[in-house]
Amino acid sequence: MRVAIVGAGLAGLATAVDLADAGCEVQIFESRPFVGGKVGSWVDNDGNHVEMGLHVFFGCYYQLFELMEKVGALSHLRLKEHSHTFINKGGRTGALDFRFFTGAPFNGLKAFFTTSQLSLQDKLQNAIALGTSPIVRGLVDFDGAMKTIRNLDKISFADWFRRHGGSEGSIKRMWNPIAYALGFIDCENISARCMLTIFQFFAVRSEASVLRMLEGSPDGYLHKPIVDYLAARGTKIYTRRQVREIQFAENDGQTHVTGIVVAQGDTTETITADAYVCACDIPGIQRILPSDWRKWSEFDNIYKLDAVPVATVQLRFDGWVTELQDAEKRKQLNYAAGIDNLLYTADADFSCFADLALTSPSDYYRPGEGSLLQLVLTPGDPFIKESNEAIAQHVLKQVHELFPSSRELNMTWYGVVKLAQSLYREAPGMDAYRPNQKTPIPNFFLAGSYTQQDYIDSMEGATISGRQAAKAILETIKQ
């Protein structure tokens, strides 16, 4: 079977791996000059590795880890301490520390009851809310709990949390930063299904809340092994190829795709295959779908979905920003110092950040230089039209507020990447509009983390969607 895939993000690559393993002849067409989609990275003219976002690998990314193991990339992950650290103004820290002599759910209970991020009252109300959630049922009936959680898509997490006795302090100081990190929107605007799905994994599986980050940039340590694996199996990947049109025909009342028109600069060609997969993001699929197909609700519903803007900022310093204890370590440039983990904050416009020179040193640590902070501005709406310099200075000011000692250091370089449309907006009620990978057109399939899969819009969600698309295609061969 010949398969043409539109989009070389994780969803498209995951689709291709399963199809190539099954002996299919696969071609992938990507409009950008690099693969990876929203997990993409590249090297600028000055040798800086630039990313589309901050990429953290939760321990419950089971499908992604399986893919990485298959292509030889699993060893490229660096394990972090089993603690989620919050940085508050003035350098005060809080944490959800999951390190405990027993596993889930007791390590989670210990984390929430010992955190300094919440007041005693907030902890008690937090316990009441989570104790009356489907998570408790999930300890003995995971599938039953997930069914209940899916039915909570129509309300926001904030509304659900308040109804179950949760406090405003918990939302502001803990849950908002986590919601921003997961979906780039706050608790008032994110579906309860989205947040409770993650909590369910954390409560039931000890490894789910463990964090890992790549040894270096996604291009070298995630995508290259996948691309090499595919190349060894005959898959062709074409970058800078924009799909302009999906061609189709109707015979005996049945619609079939007959080809896709692919542009390289000013020239176009028509690619034909036995099956076609659009592994695009929200704006990509909305652009490419033929308007005639909106007669099907499965396609028309896609236009009800929205994407969230985000801006990712990198700041390089001549010292170590997250080294809070030792001034000499902070200013020396002989070795890396500071907090080697993902960091959250409720006191800045960036919800999560990390010092990549510590967390992913192979590409980001430079001898004789200091921290390389990567920070995700959420929500990104106010910043998309700002100049890169204005954004960098705004973020620098907030870094100084979180880490007063960083005022002793100088920012030596900055980079800003803006995405006007990034993750699918996981707002209440939107889950019903997410399409299945199998469509009303028998040789046309969808992939992408916005499509139906039992996870959030993430690297894991993209991988699951790709594998489900491949499975649907391979089932057509058997029929």
Image (spheres, rainbow, N blue to C red):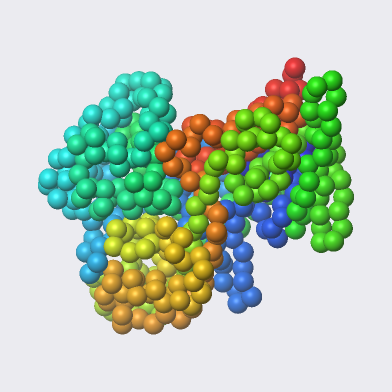
**Picture quadrant where residue 253 is located:** top right
Q: Residue at x 85, y 61 (%)?
A: 266
Instruction: Give the x, y percent position of residue 289.
Output: 71, 41
Q: Residue at x 36, y 40 (%)?
A: 156
Instruction: Give the x, y percent position of residue 80.
Output: 38, 52
Q: Is residue 259 left or right of residue 289?
A: right
Question: Looking at the image, is 451 positioned above or below residue 87?
Answer: above
**Picture quadrant where residue 469 is located:** top right
Q: Check the picture and name the quadrant holding the C terminus.
A: top right
The reply to whether residue 123 is in sight is yes
Q: Residue at x 32, y 68 (%)?
A: 322
User: Which one is in front, 382 or 447?
Assistant: 382
Q: Residue at x 84, y 20 (%)?
A: 252
User: Which one is in front, 161 or 49?
Assistant: 161
Q: How many marks?
A: 0
The reply to whether residue 358 is in sight is no
Instruction: Give the x, y percent position of residue 444.
Output: 73, 33
Q: Check the picture and name the quadrant holding the N terminus.
A: top right
Q: Is residue 353 left or right of residue 239?
A: left
As drawn, the residue found furthest toward the left would be: 120
Instruction: Give the x, y percent position of residue 143.
Output: 41, 22
Q: Is residue 39 left or right of residue 361?
A: right
